[in-house]
Structure formats: structure tokens, C-alpha cells
């Protein structure tokens, strides 16, 4: 079932069924097109006019409640990875990447102007996890023009300070990760999550996995995609780290939600806070990223 939410001379936004019980939005605009799942509040796709797609989405991704969607820009919140900090300060192993990516978000605002499409989504709750029971509100602002701007504002509605980790887990579409590189990362220290070695530094020749690294740097990054003759510029605000991930072809074969050959089509470069960050009672903090595409 299709429901046109807004349409004018510049473009339109429509709501459609992603799968049974799960709704999504898609827009067509003179600057480009894209789609967002209300389940998970997750950007699924964005393709500026006269460009290749910027975000990768698996053909075999799960679209069902309780499952994460593979691709686009999943939101890892209120924890990144598989550890949470308990009230006593000790760490506890849990399922990866928090609960926000598996919750239904609401539409707060939509706007179609001559230069852009703006979509604002919200998620609020309390006691969503025994490991993170605080009352909260998330507000996600998505602005699509010639670039992509994403801001996640987190409000702690509880009566005490809470801590979070998180990431904007972007899957970038590339012609081939073996022919893609991020030169600035060659100069940065990283923790290697595969071999467990921290504070490493090495030349990054390409982005083909298996690779899973946390870089301790928040400078702007350029993904050079030699196959498609373009550069993807990614700038973050409010984040301390970059996470670089690609499973490699061997591990991807064991991932049912990565289609055959999918590991050769993307690289994840995630704006992240992998160390615990405080949010004071009745306070808000934000993380954001801006993505621009340049022709080589």
C-alpha cells in the first residue's frame, strides 16, 4: 500500500510497506532520491542525481521485527559493539549495537523544498533494556540536498547521568573495496578488533576485509573509489572515532543477510564514539555526519 505524504513541484515523499508490518519512506527530488525505514529509523539508500548510489543495501537483508537491517546507515545506540557498562562500572556482554536499530520510529516532520528534502524521526522510551533502563528521546534529522546531513540528538529524560556508546554505521557503496582506499587512515593509530592488538599503525592499501578497526581520530575522511572514479567525503561532529569494517569474502559467505558477492560492493566507515560518553540528567548531546560525493 502506497501513501503519498507530501508532493509539490520539487518532489514527493511517500510511505510504503517494506515488509509485513514494517513501514518505510522514499523520496524523489530534483537533487536525488532515497529511502528510510521507520523500523530502526534507518536510512536505506541515497542516490544524488547523476551519481552512483552512495549507500549499499544487501539484497538478502532481513526485514522483520527483531532483526537488524543489513546496509544503509544503521544506528548503533545506546551501545556500540557487544558490551554495556553496568551501574557498578563493570562491563557485561550483550547483543551487538543496542536496541535503537530494532525499534519503530515516528515521523516528526517532513519537508520538500527546492534545494532539499528534510525528514525528522523520533524515538522515545524507558526500560527498553535491563542494561540501559533510562528514559530517553532520540531525534534524528536527515537532510538530503547535494550532500547528506544526519544528526542524532540524544536526550536523557531520567533523573541521573547516563552513559552511551554509539555509531552512525554507514555502508558505503564502492565499485570494489580492493580498489578503494582511505589515505588519511594510514597515518592514524587504531585498535584491531580481529587480532586484539591496540595502538597499531599501518598503511591501508585497500578496504577489502577481513578488516575491523577502531581509529582514534575524528578528522574528515575521503574514501577514494578508483573503480567508480569518485571520492566520498565524510565529516563527523561529536564523534571521537572512525570504525572501518568489511567482513571479507570468506566470512561474508556465512552471513545470510549479505548477498553473494556483497563483500565486494561496500566498505563501512562509521562515525562513532566507542568509549563511554556521559549525558547529564535532562540534558541533550548530538552526533552527526555530512557526506559529499566528488568526481575524480
Image (cartoon, helix red, strand yellow):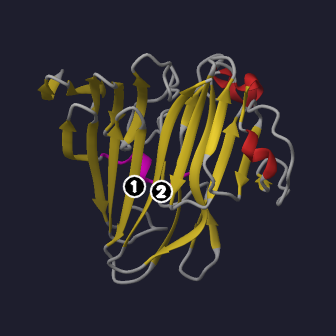
The mark that comes first in sequence, 2 or 1, is 2
User: Judging from the image, what secondary structure is the residue with disc 2 in?
Assistant: loop
Instruction: Give the answer, above or below, for where 129 lies relative to 208.
Output: below
Residue at 36% from the left image edge and 80% from the top image edge:
281
Give residue 175's quadrant in the image: top right
Rendering coords of residue 40 (x, y %): 38, 44
Q: How far apart are labels 2 and 1 at the CA level?
A: 10 Å
- The answer to whether the residues at label 2 and label 1 have Cβ atoms under 8 Å apart is yes
Q: Which residue is mark 1?
A: 152
Residue at 35% from the left image edge and 48% from the top image edge:
103
Residue at 42% from the left image edge and 28% from the top image edge:
45
Q: Which residue is mark 2?
A: 77
Rendering coords of residue 236 (x, y %): 53, 52
Residue at 50% from the left image edge and 36% from the top image edge:
292
Q: Is residue 160 left or right of residue 246?
A: left
Residue 1: in magenta span: no
Q: Nearer the viewer, residue 207 or 57?
A: 207
Q: In this figure, what is the number of numbered marks? A: 2
Rendering coords of residue 203 (x, y %): 85, 42
Instruction: Give the answer, above or below, for where 5 lies relative to 276.
Output: above
Please give the range of residues in magenta. 96-104
Amino acid at each position: 500500500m502506497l501513501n503519498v505524504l507530501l508532493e509539490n513541484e520539487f518532489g514527493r515523499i511517500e510511505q510504503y510497506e517494506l515488509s509485513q508490518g514494517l513501514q518505510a519512506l522514499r523520496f524523489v527530488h530534483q537533487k536525488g532520491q532515497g529511502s528510510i525505514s521507520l523500523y530502526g529509523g534507518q536510512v536505506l539508500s541515497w542516490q544524488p542525481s547523476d551519481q552512483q548510489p552512495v549507500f549499499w543495501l544487501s539484497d538478502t537483508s532481513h526485514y522483520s521485527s527483531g532483526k537488524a537491517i543489513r546496509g544503509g546507515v544503521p544506528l548503533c545506540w545506546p551501545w556500540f559493539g557487544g558490551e554495556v557498562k553496568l551501574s557498578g562500572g563493570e562491563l557485561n556482554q550483550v547483543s551487538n549495537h543496542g536496541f535503537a536499530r530494532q525499534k519503530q520510529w515516528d515521523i516528526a516532520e517532513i519537508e520538500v523544498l527546492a534545494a532539499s528534502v528534510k525528514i525528522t524521526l523520533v524515538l522515545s522510551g524507558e526500560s527498553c533494556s535491563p542494561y540501559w533502563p533510562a528514559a530517553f528521546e532520540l531525534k534524528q534529522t536527515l537532510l538530503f540536498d547535494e550532500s547528506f546531513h544526519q544528526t542524532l540528538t540524544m536526550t536523557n529524560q531520567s533523573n541521573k547521568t547516563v552513559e552511551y556508546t554509539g555509531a552512525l554505521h554507514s555502508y558505503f557503496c564502492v565499485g570494489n573495496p580492493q580498489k578503494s582506499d582511505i589515505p588519511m587512515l594510514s597515518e592514524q593509530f587504531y585498535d584491531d578488533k580481529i587480532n586484539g592488538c591496540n595502538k597499531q599503525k599501518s598503511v591501508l592499501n585497500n578496504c577489502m576485509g577481513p578488516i575491523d578497526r577502531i581509529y582514534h581520530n575524528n578528522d574528515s575522511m575521503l574514501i577514494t573509489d578508483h573503480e567508480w572514479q569518485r571520492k566520498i567525503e565524510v565529516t563527523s561532529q561529536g564523534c571521537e572515532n572512525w570504525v572501518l569494517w568489511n567482513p571479507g569474502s570468506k566470512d561474508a559467505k556465512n552471513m545470510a543477510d549479505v548477498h553473494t558477492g556483497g563483500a565486494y560492493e561496500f566498505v563501512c566507515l562509521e562515525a562513532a564514539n566507542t568509549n563511554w560518553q556521559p549525558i547529564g540528567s535532562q540534558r541533550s548531546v548530538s552526533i552527526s555526519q555530512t557526506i559529499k560525493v566528488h568526481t575524480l
